C-alpha cells in the first residue's frame, strides 16, 4: 500500500476508523446513536485514544463568538467527530457538518453513520478551504 504524502493526522485517522469498524462488526446498524456513542467512548478508552465528548467549541464569525457547537467527540484535541445512526446520510447532514468544521478552528472532521447498511465514514479536511477563505477575505478588505 502506497503511503499518502502529507496525510493530515494519519495515525489518529486510522485509530478512529479502526474503533468505528470494531463497533460496526459487533452491532451493525441496529441501534440508536446514543448506543454507538457510548460504545465508541469505551472503544476509545480501551485503545487509549484521547477523546473529549463534552467539549464546547465556539463558532467564530469575523473574529467574534456567535454561537457554540458541541461535537460528539473531539479526538486528540485535533479532530471533531459527529455520529449519526440513520438509513443514509443526506446532503443536509454533510452540509451541516461542513459548516460545523468551517465555523471551528479544527482542520479535520469525521462524519460517521452507523445506521446504514454499510458503515459510512466521511473524512473532511477544512485546512486548505480555510486558507482560501482567509485569502479571499484579505483580498476583499484590501479592495
Image (tube, rainbow, N blue to C red):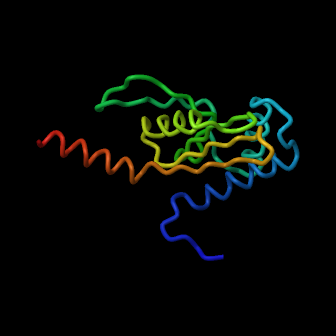
Q: Residue at x 67, y 37 (%)?
A: 83
* Side (left or right) of 30 relative to 19: right
Q: Residue at x 53, y 33 (%)?
A: 96
* Outermost left residue: 143
Image location of residue 121, percent across then percent down:
67, 49
* Side (left or right) of 112 relative to 126: right
Image location of residue 78, percent across then percent down:
52, 47
* Side (left or right) of 139 relative to 95: left
* Outermost top residue: 67
Which residue is at the front of the view, 49 or 115?
A: 115
* Outermost bottom residue: 2
Q: Residue at x 61, y 55 (%)?
A: 12
Which residue is at the front of the view, 13 or 44?
A: 13
Which residue is at the front of the view, 53 or 16?
A: 16
Q: On screen, 143 above or below 132?
A: above
* Location of residue 67 (image quadrant): top left
Image location of residue 133, percent across then percent down:
31, 45
Q: Residue at x 38, y 23 (%)?
A: 66
Pick the quarter of the image with the N terminus.
bottom right
How many labels were placed on the picture? 0
Image location of residue 86, percent across then percent down:
74, 33
Pick the quarter of the image with the C terminus.
top left
* Side (left or right) of 65 relative to 22: left
Amino acid at each position: 500500500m502506497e503511503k499518502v504524502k502529507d496525510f493530515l493526522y494519519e495515525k489518529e485517522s486510522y485509530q478512529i476508523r479502526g474503533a468505528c469498524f470494531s463497533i460496526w462488526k459487533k452491532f451493525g446498524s441496529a441501534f440508536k446513536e446514543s448506543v454507538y456513542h457510548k460504545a465508541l467512548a469505551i472503544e476509545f478508552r480501551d485503545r487509549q485514544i484521547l477523546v473529549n465528548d463534552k467539549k464546547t467549541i465556539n463558532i467564530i464569525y469575523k473574529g467574534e463568538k456567535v454561537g457554540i457547537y458541541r461535537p460528539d467527540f473531539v479526538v486528540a484535541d485535533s479532530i471533531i467527530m459527529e455520529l449519526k445512526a440513520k438509513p443514509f446520510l443526506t446532503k443536509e447532514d454533510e452540509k451541516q457538518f461542513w459548516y460545523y468544521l468551517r465555523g471551528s478552528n479544527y482542520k479535520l472532521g469525521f462524519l460517521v453513520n452507523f445506521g446504514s447498511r454499510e458503515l459510512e465514514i466521511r473524512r473532511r479536511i477544512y485546512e486548505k478551504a480555510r486558507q482560501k477563505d482567509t485569502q479571499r477575505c484579505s483580498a476583499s478588505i484590501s479592495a
